Image: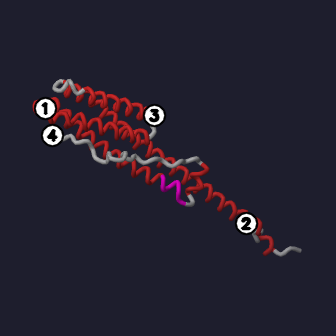
Amino acid sequence: MTNKKDERKFPVWGIVLIVVGVVVLAIFGWGISTNNKLVSLEEGVTKDSAQIESQLQRRMDLIPNLVNTVKGYAAHETDVYTAVSEARAKLGGAISGGNMNEISSASSAMDSALGRLIAIAEAYPELKASANFIGLQDELAGTENRINQARQTYNEAVADYNKSIKVFPSNIIAGMGNFEQKSYFEAAEGAKDVPEVEF
């Protein structure tokens, strides 16, 4: 005859099975949550990268007008115009490629070429007084400020993302999901300053 107390007892293997199931579900849930967080951070980096590219494109769009305005007063400065044109083409190619290291390098070259172009205005007081030139100068200064803000936002997003894929235990999910470290937008050596646009 069996004891009624023994019939009510839950078997030990059942308890072990429930505990294992709960642990597996918790790990699975954590893995999904961590993966989603990493995807979200990576998308944030991509979005901020696109913002930099957009602002650099805006600056590139201003350059032909600026060059043409300066050419109207200083047509003989062909070396400078050629340097600006080449730097602009290089930056356009880098933006199309989407590699942040190449974009950063090309942007620094563009900064240098623009600095040379704008320096020409010092020798031509009538150019400095031109309403068209003043308007372009203001647009360029505003664009440079937006570029700097976009760079800062991008680098902050990269820092958050890179930290998340390196710390334990989320680095396990990052390794399984092939989340790779992103590059910061860094100015090339000697290009830390924004081109001077005040006259």
Check disc 3 and give the amino acid type: Gly
Q: Are marks 4 and 1 in contact (CB under 8 Å)?
A: no
Q: Is residue 172 above or below residue 139?
A: below
Helix, strand or loop under label 1: loop
Picture quarter with the C terminus: top left
Q: CA distance from mark 4 to mark 3?
A: 35 Å
Q: Badge 4 is on which residue?
A: 199
Q: Badge 2 is on which residue?
A: 16
Q: Earlier in the sequence, mark 4 or mark 1?
A: 1
Q: CA distance from mark 2 to mark 1?
A: 86 Å
Q: CA distance from mark 3 to mark 2?
A: 54 Å
Between 2 and 81, the one lying in front of the other is 81
Report the mark closest to the observer, 4 or 2.
4
- The circle on residue 124 is 1
Residue 46 in picture, x, y percent from top left: 44, 42
Q: Earlier in the sequence, mark 3 or mark 2?
A: 2
Q: Badge 3 is on which residue?
A: 97
Quadrant assignment, res 126 = top left
Q: Are marks 3 and 2 in contact (CB under 8 Å)?
A: no
Q: Residue at x 50, y 55 (%)?
A: 164
- Please report the bounds of the magenta region as a residue range: 162-167
